Image (cartoon, rainbow, N blue to C red):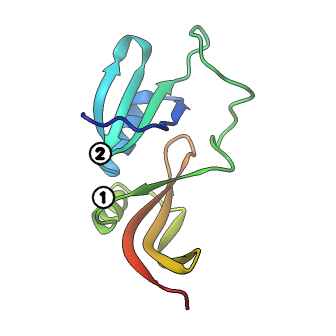
Amino acid sequence: MDTWAKLVPELIVDDLSSSIRFWCDLVGFAVLYDRAESKFAYLNLDGAQVMLEQRDHNERQWITGALDKPLGRGINFQIEVPEIEPIISKLAEAGWPLFMESEEKWYRADKIEVGQRQFLVKDPDGYLLRLVMDLGERPLA
C-alpha cells in the first residue's frame, strides 16, 4: 500500500472474524495487515480504509460510552466503489438484507449536482455503510 488515508475510522466489533467475512467477502475490502494477537485488522478498498478491532474488556480500548447495538448510530460511511451491482449480488446470495435498496440520487454541490447510484447496508455490528457509484456531474436542475 503506497497511500494511507488521512482519516481512518477504527470500529469496535463483537467478532472480528464475522466482520472480516462481511467487509472482505461481501463488500470487497482486503486485509492490508492484521494483528491476530490483538484481534485487529486494517482493511482497504481502492483507498477507502477502515480498522476493525474486536471488543476486549482486558485491553486498552478508547470506548467513551455503552456499546449498545446497533453500533455507530448517527453515522454512515460513504464508500465509493466502481460498481455496486456485484456487491448487491454477493449480499443477496449471502441472504444479507439491505438497509436501503439501490437508488439514483443527485446532490447539490454549490452550482452543480453530483450524482451517484447508492444503497445502504449494515455490517454485523450495525455500522451503516453507504456504497456509492459515481454518476458524474450536471448543471443545477
Residue at position x 74%, y 29% in the image: 66
Give the x, y percent position of residue 22: 38, 44
Image location of residue 30, percent across then percent down: 28, 39
> Could you tell me if residue 135 is visible in this image?
yes
Q: Which mark is residue 90?
A: 1
Q: Residue at x 56, y 22 (%)?
A: 55
Give the tally of numbered discs. Answer: 2
Please provide percent x and percent y for residue 2. 25, 34
Three-letter amino acid code of the residue under disc 1: Lys
At a point 55% along the width and 40% down the height, the residue shown is: 125
Badges 2 and 1: C-beta atoms under 8 Å apart?
A: yes
Inspect this view and state whether residue 105 appears.
Answer: no
Residue 141 position within the rendered picture, expressed as x and y whole percent measured from the top left: 55, 91
Q: CA distance from mark 2 to mark 1?
A: 8 Å
Whether 63 is drawn above or below 75: the answer is above
The label shown at residue 25 is 2
Q: Which secondary structure, mark 2?
A: helix
Horizontal side of 125 relative to 82 (left or right) equals right
Tell me the kind of residue under disc 2.
Answer: Asp
Residue at 51%, 31% in the rendered image? 10
